[in-house]
Image: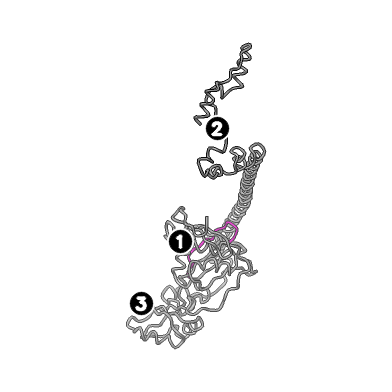
Amino acid sequence: MENGTPQRGRGGPARVTKTPDGRTVQSFRSHPIYGFDKIKEKVMTELNCPQLDLTALDTSEKKFNAQSRLFVGNLPRDIPYEELKEMFAKYGELGQVYFNKDGAYAFINFDYKANAEKAKNELQGKMVRNRPMKIRYASVTTGVRIKNLTPYVSNELLHKSFSVFGEIESCRVIVDDRGKTTGDGVVVFCDKKGATIALKKCQEECYFLTSSLRPVIVEPLEAGDEEEGNPENSMHKNNDYRNERKDGPRFADRNSFEFEYGMRWKRLYEMYKEKKMLLESDLQAEMEQLEARFALVRHEHETEKLRRELMAREAEAMQMGRYRQSSNYQDRYMGGSQENRYSDYHGSARPNERYQQPPPNSSEDRYSQAPPTERYPPSTPEERYPQARSNEYSQQGGGVKREPATEEFDMKRTRY
């Protein structure tokens, strides 16, 4: 089939397109859930090829990113929108500013994280109409956590694989203190639409990033601020706070009830740790077994594919052999080609040559070309078969052959 010819397939019409590296790919343009599936088409035409030596990512901070977005709480409901913007505008360029008067909170997006950090440190706890402001970094709602990654997935490959869902703000593969990947990654999109599409698409289908049949597991990014922590000025200083803080840090005596209950907590934590390690060990064994099965199934699949290709080639060779044998038989027993056989049978190379003789010019030429006896066959049985009649008379015992009458012969000559 030529490039661009539409076909009918599952889920709707399909088309064949050519990739930049010259590969021909068939992709289905219609999806039963998403309709016009541009994402799958882009993956199959642009990404489904060897991904080697990828270009390094640009790690510079993007303007108005999710990391430079502040949450401002405990605001007075009667504060004007312009006054709120003017209060934060002196620390840097502002992007989107959302103020909810009913909830008494606001989201303010700065151009860079350094300016957001400066505004947060200087305005934290500031009294605005007898109400202290509470400022912290806003939760990232446009991010997803990627799990079940192979050790050969880099930041660049992860970024390229998930850029089909939307513009990416930041992307990284999580590693431990020795630089070994943990199998997890974090992708933060510029808008929430990209995160939603990536989450839904990868949950409903199997998305592989490498040759290994380990699909990525995409989950929403849990909201958490590991950099800021829990500062003292963000604590709610109520009765529970005072009761909890009335005793400071201390070591318990070995014979006290505090020591006994403390040891129970430790044993419970050790039990949790052992069960977690046992579960991780069982999970690792199941993963290794699945990898071994995959290697075996892949080997069988490749063997079956080679066997089918070999059978197809053998069938083609047998068909070619039968064709050659048929050609040799025609050349040997049937006088070569069809044109030569026709010439031998009819006396001319082509059928039309027998009818291309020039007609005689006159009636004299028409009757002067040959004597009547040659141009016309005998009319009587004796004239047609003279030799047979002679033999018949000889076999009857002395029969004498009779010559035709001279008058009859002269009359025939006169007639013609």
Q: Earlier in the sequence, mark 1 or mark 2?
A: 1
Q: Residue furthest top?
A: 397
Residue 294 place in picture, x, y as percent:
60, 52
Q: CA distance from mark 1 to mark 2?
A: 89 Å
Depicted 67 relative to depicted 373: above or below: below
- SS at circle 1: loop
The dot on residue 37 is 1
Q: Is residue 337 visible?
A: yes
Front label number (1 vs 2): 2
| Amino acid beneath label 3 | Asn
Asked whether 332 or 235 is in front, the reply is 332
Q: Which residue is mark 3?
A: 100
Q: Which residue is mark 2?
A: 372
Depicted 96 relative to depicted 206: above or below: below
Q: Residue furthest bottom?
A: 90
Q: Residues within 10 Å of mark 1 (few under 14, many from 20)?
A: some
Secondary structure mainly formed by the magenta segment: loop
Q: CA distance from mark 1 to mark 3?
A: 37 Å
Describe residue 128's horizontal placement relative to residue 4 as left or right. left
| Amino acid beneath label 2 | Pro
| Amino acid beneath label 1 | Asp
Q: Quadrant of residue 13?
A: bottom left
Which segment is the magenta one? 210-223
Asked whether 91 or 377 is in front, the reply is 377
